[in-house]
Image (tube, helix red, strand yellow):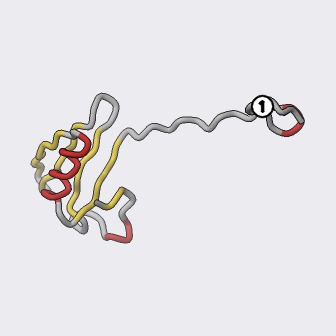
Amino acid sequence: MSSARGAGRKGKRSMPPRSRPVVHLELHTGDVPGASAFYSELCGWRPEWIHAGGGSYLALDMGRRQGGGIVELGRYLLPAATSGIAA
C-alpha cells in the first residue's frame, strides 16, 4: 500500500468525490416575508414576486448559476413531502 496522498488499496489512487453544485433551491417556510428579509440580508439574494394563475411565488435571484424561491409551507406541498430546506 502506498503512503502517497490520495492512494487507496493496492496502490490505486482514489478519486475525489464529484462536485454536484446546487442549481435550484426551494425554501419552504411558514413566514415568507421573514424568510425573504433574512436571506436577502444574509446572502444578498434578490427576491421578486411572480404572479401566476394558480397563485404567486417568491423567486430568488441567487447569482449566475443558481435560482430558487420561497414557498409558503403547506401551500403546495404537505410538510412531510417537502424536500427543500425549511426556513
Helix or strand or loop: what does disc 1 sit on? loop
At x 22% / y 40%, what residue is drawn?
45
- Give above or below for 83 relative to 7: below
Q: Which residue is mark 1?
A: 13
22 sits to left or right of 71:
right
Horizontal and vertical percent position of residue 22 = 41, 41
Q: Quadrant of the N terminus?
A: top right
Identify which amino acid the numbered label 1 is placed on.
Answer: Arg
- Estimate the x, y position of residue 27 in percent, counting from the top left: 29, 55
User: Quick one: label 1, few (<14), some, or many (20+) residues within 10 Å?
Assistant: few
Residue 21 as seen in the image, left or right of residue 13? left
49 vs 7, left or right, is left
Q: Looking at the image, which is closer to me, 37 or 49?
A: 37
Is 29 above or below relative to 80?
above
Q: Position of residue 15 (x, y in %)?
A: 69, 33
The residue at 39%/59% (across/down) is: 83
Residue at (32, 70) in percent of width and height: 79
At x 22%, y 57%, the residue is 71
Would you identify the image quadrant in which residue 23 lies? top left
- Which residue is situated farthest in the front direction here? 3
Measured as percent of width and height from the top left, residue 53 is found at 11, 52
Q: In the picture shown, does residue 84 fall above or below 12?
A: below
Q: Quadrant of the C terminus?
A: bottom left
